[in-house]
Image (tube, helix red, strand yellow):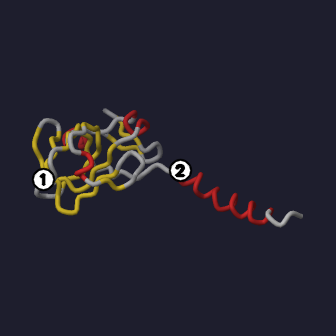
Amino acid sequence: MPRCLPTVMAALALSVPLLVAAQVVRPIPTQSLRGEMVFGQPPEVLLNGQVVRLAPGARIKDPNNMLVLSGALVGQKVIANYTADPYGLLMDVWVLNERELAKPWPKTPEEAATWVYDLVSQTWIKP
């Protein structure tokens, strides 16, 4: 048996979990809403045409679920899901990928109150 075979086998065994992890759907909370955002000078964001601010410690995740600083997004227009704190400041932002954009998601609290979330398919169903 070649001496490098155990090393190759170990490398393959370690890469399998990485392939499986790439297929995981990222958890976006059901209380989040979807909107169009244009990032201005931090901490300002234009959300659905209204000026809002990012909360101190806000987390922005790109389509690959990596953290992004708001300064890196200045001038960019994105479709994202977001949560807000009780003061109306944006707390968490998920910039959506193609698969997430294809799924319907409520844009207002009124829509969220009337739509039904299916846990199995992880999609919102309009009435």
Q: Would residue 113 appear left or right of 117 to someone viewing this image?
A: left
Label tally: 2
Label 2 – label 1 distance at C-alpha:
33 Å
The residue under label 1 is which amino acid type?
Gly
At 24% from the left and 37% from the top, the residue drawn is 77
Check the picture and name the quadrant holding the N terminus: bottom right
**Residue at the front extreme, as displayed:** 3
Disc 2 crowd, CA 10 A, few/some/many (<14, 14-19, 20+): few
Q: Would residue 33 appear left or right of 54 to someone viewing this image?
A: right
Q: Position of residue 49 (x, y in %)?
A: 13, 36
Check the picture and name the quadrant holding the C terminus: top left
At 17% from the left and 62% from the top, the residue drawn is 56
Q: Is residue 49 above or below residue 92?
A: above
State the mark number for residue 10.
none
Q: Quadrant of residue 18?
A: bottom right
State the mark number for residue 88.
1
Q: Nearer the viewer, residue 119 or 83?
A: 83
Q: Secondary structure at mark 2?
A: loop
The residue under label 2 is which amino acid type?
Ala
At 53% from the left and 50% from the top, the residue drawn is 22
Q: Quadrant of residue 55?
A: bottom left
Q: Position of residue 98 (x, y in %)?
A: 41, 36
Q: Nearer the viewer, residue 87 or 115?
A: 87
Q: Are marks 2 and 1 in contact (CB under 8 Å)?
A: no
Q: Position of residue 87 (x, y in %)?
A: 10, 57
Q: Is residue 49 above or below residue 71?
A: above
Q: Would residue 7 appear left or right of 84 to someone viewing this image?
A: right
**Residue at the right extreme, as displayed:** 1
Disc 1 crowd, CA 10 A, few/some/many (<14, 14-19, 20+): few
In the picture of the structure, the residue carrying the numbered disc 2 is: 22
